[in-house]
Image (cartoon, helix red, strand yellow):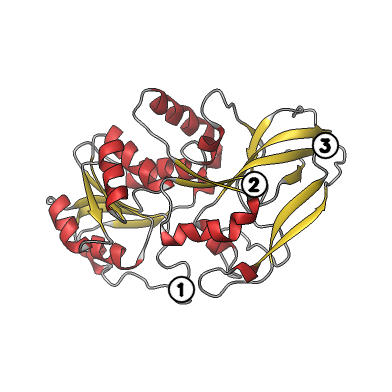
Amino acid sequence: MENSNTQILLASRPTGVPQKANWLIKKSDLPTIEDGEVLLKIKYISIDPAMRGWINDTRSYIPPVQIGEVMRAGTIGEIIASNNDKFQIGDTVTGWNGVQTHAVSDGKGLYKVDGRVAPLPTFLGTLGMPGMTGYFGLLTIGQPKEGETLLVSGAAGAVGSVVGQIAKIKGCRVVGIAGGEQKCAYIKDELGFDGAIDYKNESVKDGIKRECPKGIDIYFDNVGGEILDTALTRINMKARIVICGAISQYNNNVVKGPSNYLSLLVNRARMEGMVVMDYAKDYGTAVMQMAQWMGEGKLKSKEFIVDGIETFPDTLLRLFSGDKMGKLIIKV
């Protein structure tokens, strides 16, 4: 058994895009466990856009990561020592155990996962937080109805790809906004979207006119900024706008709000924010439904896996450059 732990700590708060100097790689002896605790060897670490918000010292839905603390992250790991009756050595579990190779837990917030149901990385993607975000954001706030048009930004990402596929299952016309020919081909050819708008190589305004000729009934927003503003000009009466994220704004000191918000008034539309943690009590039901759709071939999952915990500072930046497809994960 390894006798050392490698951790990524927050060394300083970034201004703008996080730099390597904002992180500290710390090596230390393996922690010992007390009664009721377990020791995990972490196998996979989830890299999520929300991480950028977690390292700002601002009021949010969750306290910020403090200077000198292990960076917060969702993980999958194997229990290698246990003083907790609920967990045995060899159990595979998911939970919030941070960017480190090993972690001690009292068992709260740990959930067993079964690698026979799906490959383990899928439990950080389609069957994990991004999948739950897409599922609850679309179904509870978006409330899709057959025949409606759904537009989703960040469509080739972990959340957007799930949103579009579930909307197809619910009978919607689905259009995705993504960056580059490869991602646009992926959402149409592999995921079955009806249309794609390449924001890197065409006018989003023209693309929405072309792909959403009957307007937008549901807009699922992962990017904010100008794309949100443009989508608001094409919404239908009683449209629903789901505010899930704003990755175009996360590294800005001042976040630009929507200037076209009066379209909500004119169209009696609704814009609502969502945080996936609000739905935690219903995750189990959602995972069962999503796993069933995956088994039926209606829901596909893609993971982009980078090797090595030391790559964390660079891997995090792939979220903002778009240099990945699907769910971004580090294999420890």
Please state which of the two labelled residues, at mark 1 or mark 3, is closer to the viewer.
Answer: 1
Q: Where's residue 2, x and y in %? A: 80, 41
Amino acid beneath label 3: Gly
Which image quarter: residue 312?
Answer: bottom right
Amino acid beneath label 2: Trp
Which image quarter: residue 258?
Answer: bottom left
What numbered label is drawn on residue 168? none
Q: Secondary structure at mark 1?
A: loop
Mark 2 vs 3, N-terminal side: 3
Mark 2 vs 1, N-terminal side: 2
- Up/down of 70 relative to 109, above or below: below
Residue visible at 61% across and 70% down in the picture: 57
| Callout 1 touching callout 3 (CB < 8 Å) | no
**Mark 1 surroundings: few (<14), some (14-19) or many (≥20) residues within 10 A:** few
Residue visible at 26% across and 38% down in the picture: 189
Question: From this viewpoint, is residue 282 visible?
Answer: no
Quickly name the residue at label 1. 252
Measure the alpha-carbon separation of dots 1 and 3. Answer: 43 Å
Q: Secondary structure at mark 3?
A: loop
Amino acid beneath label 1: Asn
Q: Nearer the viewer, residue 65 or 203?
A: 203
What numbered label is drawn on residue 96? 2
Which image quarter: residue 53?
Answer: bottom right
Residue visible at 31% across and 43% down in the picture: 186
**Mark 2 surroundings: few (<14), some (14-19) or many (≥20) residues within 10 A:** some
Please state which of the two labelled residues, at mark 2 or mark 3, is closer to the viewer.
Answer: 2
Q: Secondary structure at mark 2?
A: loop
Quickly name the residue at label 3. 36
Residue visible at 86% across and 44% down in the picture: 32
Q: Where's residue 164, x and y in %? A: 32, 42
